[in-house]
Amino acid sequence: AQSVTQPDARVTVSEGASLQLRCKYSYSGTPYLFWYVQYPRQGLQLLLKYYSGDPVVQGVNGFEAEFSKSNSSFHLRKASVHWSDSAVYFCVLSALTNSAGNKLTFGIGTRVLVRP
Amino acid sequence: GPKVLQIPSHQIIDMGQMVTLNCDPVSNHLYFYWYKQILGQQMEFLVNFYNGKVMEKSKLFKDQFSVERPDGSYFTLKIQPTALEDSAVYFCASSLYGGTYAEQFFGPGTRLTVL
């Protein structure tokens, strides 16, 4: 069975500061990892994804994430946040299934509040 | 970008009644999904659907649940009868491709309250 842990339920940062959101996963196979963001009253939107290769992946809006197989982690970061980055961020694992489509395993989400 | 719509945004019903949650997926997508999120808990996979059939379902997808997409219209989740523990936010998603790295596009969710 697979699982995703986001240890920080809430993070508050000042505008212009850096941000790091932590994510740990547990999965015996090859993980396919995603970060999604949910803005108020909207659906989840994909920020970035990792399959293989360079462990640092770039996403939209200046976000990047670093995969570490040894630490089973996929942390998200941004060098300088804007007030519009206030949202809930989900770390997500996609695992092989025995069917078509894919089945996602979600972390509980980290709510980010950016103070002006 | 492509959008998934969900109707209604909030539904309140009495226990034992039937409810249908509607999802309008991205128009050319072929794979459809429902997820359930109880307040304060992780979002969890319920079911995926392709080519008119349920491909995989989780333990949360009880016998009272059913899904369909008649004639390429809404992708629906029906619960009959509802129970108190069905209160949650239900998210619909769709993807063009299957496989572990297919991007799923999510709707904003339907908050279901069972009294």
Image: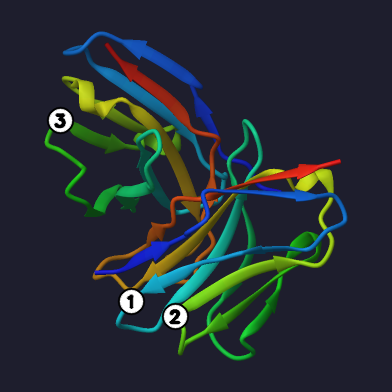
Q: Which residue is mark 2?
A: A72
Nearer the camera: disc 1 or disc 3: 1
- Label 2 crowd bin: few (<14), some (14–19), many (20+), radius 10 Å: some
- Distance of label 1 from label 3 (alpha carbons): 31 Å
Disc 1 and disc 2 in contact, CB within 8 angstroms: yes
Position of residue A101 in the picture relative to residue A77 (left or right): left
**Could you tell me which residue is drawn at 53 percent across and 80 percent down?**
A51
In terms of secondary structure, where does tag 1 sit? loop
Disc 3 and disc 2 in contact, CB within 8 angstroms: no
- Label 3 crowd bin: few (<14), some (14–19), many (20+), radius 10 Å: few
Tag 3: amino acid: Gln
If the image is split into quadrants, where does the C terminus of chain B sit? top left
- Distance of label 3 from label 2 (alpha carbons): 37 Å
Asked whether A54 or A72 is in front, the reply is A72
Q: Which mark is residue B64?
A: 3
Q: Which mark is residue B32?
A: none
**Could you tell me which residue is drawn at 41 percent across and 68 percent down?**
A94
In terms of secondary structure, where does tag 3 sit? loop
Q: Which residue is mark 1?
A: A27
- Whether residue A63 is situated above or below residue A30 in the rendered picture: above
In terms of secondary structure, where does tag 2 sit? loop
Nearer the camera: disc 3 or disc 2: 2
Q: Chain of mark 3?
A: B
**Could you tell me which residue is drawn at 44 percent across and 56 percent down?**
A107
Tag 1: amino acid: Tyr
Q: Chain of mark 1?
A: A
Query: What percent of the width, then of the height, locates residue A63?
Result: 74, 65
Query: What percent of the width, then of the height, locates residue A110?
Result: 55, 51
The quadrant where residue B37 appears: top left
Count of labels shown?
3
Position of residue B105 in the picture relative to residue A14 (left or right): left
- Distance of label 1 from label 2 (alpha carbons): 9 Å
